[in-house]
């Protein structure tokens, strides 16, 4: 057993679930910080120690981090509706501050924080992708999730400079893979499986196998430079390209049409209105509709060079996600 004691917050998300397995495969002693009452299927029967608490509770966070050498902070609120949401800010900013304070108090060897590639401006084409030098531009969408992740990232880097926090930031793009229990990114795979994707939008973004992000995060225990950010991504693809790839991989029909931008945005706007009226969580909002008509492409050259980021074929990640859904009863026949 590797002697380093590791804590993972947010271990039940698609990234956290894959990260825990990657760390166990490297023979680390792994503990996780879970919300009270949660017993996620993705962590069932794993040889891990469980701490239960609220990321906003200072004492509970400090208790979980005490005695740990390495901390991975994956916990976050990813809610996009409503676009402005005080709870999202509290979880993502105040919760991160609690983790930082506990790491400084306990003198951890390294904190690896999970941000998002959207914390940097993207490129408008695959030939001119965004990188870690780009300024933040996603503020134009007015979504607290994106804004709060950027602010939490700034909080981490500020503590590196001012308080000697030994932290590294990993900025994943859109992750696909197994153990997507919510489901999150795998929702579009389910939509194509069920024939519920009416068409693609004109935009595009960067995709990566979630196992590659878990692998590069584990590498960051001993690799990388303190105070640096690393975009973890792979394929820059238009939505039609990725829908076609998903359909081919899972043996289903791809959506035939690329829908006009005004249709996409009108649908998202109506969905947001009715969700507000009838109090349900929409899968597609006005803000997400606008984002889907834009291009968000990134380079991961820095992570490949300094953290040995792997580049697994996206088809493999799609297949693993689909098979996990099938095994766990997510697929409607």
Image: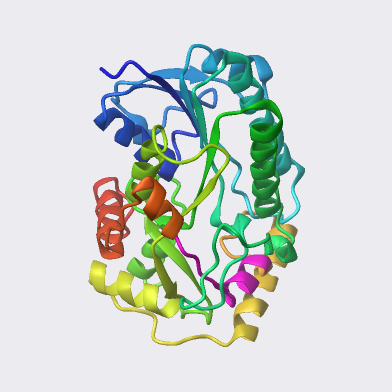
**Does 91 sit above or below residue 238?**
above
- What's the residue at 49%, 11% (across, down)? 67
Quarter of the figure that contains the C terminus: bottom left
In the foreground, 4 or 14:
4
Which of the two residues, 9 or 23, is positioned nearer the viewer here?
Answer: 23
Give the magenta range: 287-300
Which quadrant does the N terminus fall into? top left
In this rendering, the answer to whether 235 lies above or below 258 is above
Q: Is residue 292 magenta?
A: yes
Residue 55 seen from this side: no
In the image, taking residue 219 as reference, residue 108 lies left or right, namely: right
- Considering depth in this image, is 295 or 289 the residue closer to the camera? 295
Instruction: Tell me residue 294's x, y (percent).
Output: 59, 76
Residue at horizontal 61 percent and vertical 84 percent from the top: 261
Q: Position of residue 66 (x, y in %)?
A: 53, 12
Name which quarter of the figure residue 47 lies in: top left
Q: Where residue 254 sits: x, y (%)?
A: 34, 79
**Direction from residue 143 to residue 116 in the image, left or right:** left
Q: Is residue 230 above or below residue 252?
A: above
């Amino acid at each position: 057993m590797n002697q380093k004691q590791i804590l993972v917050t947010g271990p039940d998300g698609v990234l956290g679930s894959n990260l825990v397995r990657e760390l166990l495969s490297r023979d680390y002693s792994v503990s996780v910080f879970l919300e009270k009452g949660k017993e996620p299927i993705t962590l069932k029967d794993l040889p891990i120690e469980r701490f239960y608490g609220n990321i906003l509770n200072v004492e509970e966070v400090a208790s979980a981090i005490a005695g740990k050498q390495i901390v991975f902070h994956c916990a976050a609120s990813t809610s996009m509706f409503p676009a402005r949401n005080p709870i999202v800010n509290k979880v993502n900013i105040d919760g991160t501050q609690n983790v930082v304070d506990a790491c400084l108090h306990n003198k951890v060897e390294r904190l690896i924080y999970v941000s998002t590639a959207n914390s940097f401006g993207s490129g408008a084409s695959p030939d001119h992708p965004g990188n870690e030098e780009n300024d933040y531009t996603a503020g134009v969408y007015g979504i607290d999730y994106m804004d709060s992740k950027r602010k939490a990232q700034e909080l981490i880097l500020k503590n590196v400079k001012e308080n000697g926090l030994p932290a590294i930031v990993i900025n994943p793009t859109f992750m696909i893979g197994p153990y997507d229990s919510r489901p999150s990114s795998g929702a579009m795979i389910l939509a194509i499986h069920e024939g519920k994707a009416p068409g693609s939008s004109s935009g595009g973004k960067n995709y990566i196998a979630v196992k590659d992000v878990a692998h590069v995060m584990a590498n960051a225990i001993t690799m990388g430079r303190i105070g640096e950010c690393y975009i973890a991504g792979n394929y820059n693809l238009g939505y039609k390209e990725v829908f076609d790839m998903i359909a081919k991989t899972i043996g289903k029909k791809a959506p035939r049409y690329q829908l006009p931008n005004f249709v996409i945005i009108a649908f998202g706007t109506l969905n947001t209105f009715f969700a507000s009226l009838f109090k349900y969580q929409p899968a597609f909002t006005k803000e997400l509709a606008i984002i889907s008509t834009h291009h968000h492409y990134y380079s991961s050259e820095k992570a490949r060079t300094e953290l040995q980021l792997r580049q697994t074929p996206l088809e493999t990640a799609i297949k693993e996600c689909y098979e996990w859904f099938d095994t766990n009863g997510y697929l409607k026949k």
